[in-house]
Image: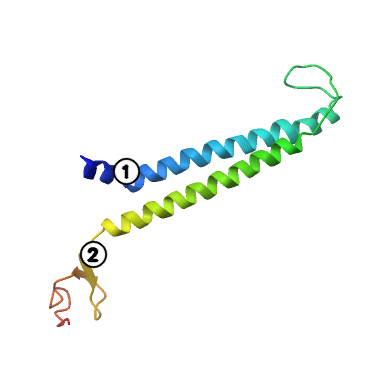
Amino acid sequence: MLKEFKEFALKGNMMDLAVGVIIGAAFKDVVTSLVDNVIMPFVAMFTGSINFDKWVIPGTAIKYGTFISAVINFIIMAFIIFLMVKAMNKLRKKDEEVTTKVCPHCKSEIDIEATKCPNCTSDLQ
């Protein structure tokens, strides 16, 4: 059962999907923060200080600190995901067995135990 779970967890498609979801969620926060805290206050300045969230006219404050925090959060998340993927790739490489080799003469892929290339009939070492 543990072996089956390991095979499932190390499948490339599942890891790629997980990475995409996590990075996407972190990137969503960055974009949301950019729009809410940096772009919209500038828009509000040019439209008479309209707050589009509440449709009132408050004082405009650019919350660039919130945006910087979201960017830092994204960078940290991306680095952690990078480390996780790197570790998973190491595990994946250990599990993969080499079953083929390349013929030095015709460059075709052949069985690792072949002594004669089936394509060009060259003798192999």
Mark 1 or 2: in front is 1
Q: Amino acid at mark 2?
A: Val
Q: From mark 1 to mark 2, how far is it between C-alphas?
A: 21 Å
Lower position in the chain sequence, tag 1 or tag 2: 1
Give above or below for 112 relative to 66.
Answer: below
Give above or below for 75 relative to 35.
Answer: below
Place of residue 33 in the rendered image (x, y in percent of width and height, measured from the top left): 67, 34
**Quadrant in which the N terminus appears:** top left
Residue at screen point 32% across, 47% down: 10
Place of residue 21 in the rendered image (x, y in percent of width and height, measured from the top left): 47, 38
Q: Which residue is mark 2?
A: 98
Label of residue 9 in the image: 1
Q: Nearer the viewer, residue 48 or 30?
A: 30
Q: What SS does tag 1 mark? A: helix
Could you say which quadrant of the image residue 94 lies in?
A: bottom left
Q: What SS does tag 2 mark? A: loop
Place of residue 100 in the rendered image (x, y in percent of width and height, measured from the top left): 21, 67
Q: Amino acid at mark 1?
A: Ala
Residue farthest front in this picture: 2
**Quadrant in which the C terminus appears:** bottom left
Mark 2 neighbour class, 10 Å CA radius: few under 14, some 14 to 19, many 20 or more: few
Relative side of 31 to 110, left or right:
right
Mark 1 neighbour class, 10 Å CA radius: few under 14, some 14 to 19, many 20 or more: some
Which color mode does the image show? rainbow
Number of numbered markers: 2
Give above or below for 83 relative to 102.
Answer: above
Relative side of 106 to 36, left or right:
left
Residue at screen point 49% across, 39% down: 22
Q: Nearer the viewer, residue 48 or 15?
A: 15
Residue at screen point 65% across, 43% down: 71
Q: Nearer the viewer, residue 7 or 46?
A: 7
